[in-house]
Image (spheres, rainbow, N blue to C red):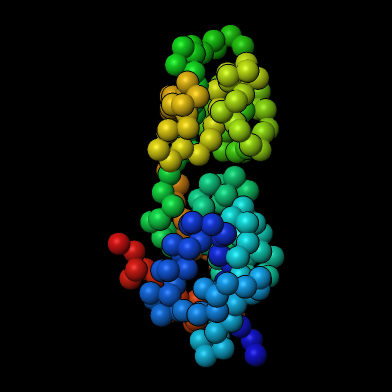
Amino acid sequence: MEYLNIALPKGRLGEKVYAMFESAGFECPSIKEDNRKLTFENEEKGIRYFWVKPSDVAIYVERGAADIGVAGKDILLEYSPDVYELLDLDIGKCRVAVAAPAAFRDNPKRALKVATKFANIAKAHYTAKGREIDIIHLNGSIELAPILSLSDVIVDIVETGRTLKENGLEVVEDIVPISARLIANKASSKFKGEIIEIIKNGLAKEIK
């Protein structure tokens, strides 16, 4: 049997996303069972779900291992995967922002040192401002970089700003709002367009 493959992001966001699919009529009871399975099928509906790391969803969809999936707008902006963006699900809302120590004052006479895992978003932002920057690519604990003078500022995802505050940092500039997006593989959109459209419309009705 040929399934429609759906990549869901692991974690709290993925659980919210699955709840939307379930509420829209695309349930898969086995996904809630306590087991170590990696894929979950509903034969009657012809759908198969699997959980992947949030930053990998777009890769699975772009390469065709998944027909559709849900990825953060930050991932789509940073990696520019060759996929269709079908719908803003209006959940997982946060923003990419520039943060710095409260006492920081920019010196335009030298390159600004920017620590981030979103190098492309940061480059595009500062290029538009005509500001020369030195990107320091980090994968975790980005807030540590300005504290230890590794960087002047950071570009990172900000939800509440609490972690920044606890580390003596503050948002100095918002770059772009972020939320979860339904994306589709381009070939799948052609060959499985009907079911993808039904799912998209079903999810659209679930957006509060």
Q: Which residue is at the far front?
A: 34
In the figure, is residue 87 to the left or right of 133? left
Farthest residue toward the left?
208
Residue appearing at x 51%, y 52% in the figure: 72
Q: Nearer the viewer, residue 119 or 157?
A: 157
Q: Position of residue 85 (x, y in %)?
A: 50, 61
Vertical side of 73 occupied by 10: above or below: below
Tell me the quadrant of the picture where the N terminus can be found: bottom right
Residue sitting at x 33%, y 71%: 205
Classify 7 as above or below 125. Answer: below
Residue 98, above or below 194: above
Task: Residue 194: tell me if it is visible.
Answer: yes
- Please name the residue shown 56% across and 88% down the image: 43
Question: Quadrant of the image for the C terminus?
Answer: bottom left
Q: Position of residue 112 (x, y in %)?
A: 59, 18
Q: Which quadrant of the view contains residue 5?
A: bottom right
**Residue 190 visible in the snapshot:** no
Locate residue 115, reporting x and y percent: 62, 28
Q: In which quarter of the view is residue 2 placed?
A: bottom right
Q: Position of residue 179 (x, y in %)?
A: 44, 51
Please give the count of numbered marks on the rendered protein.
0
Instruction: Look at the picture and state if 129 lies above or below 191.
Output: above
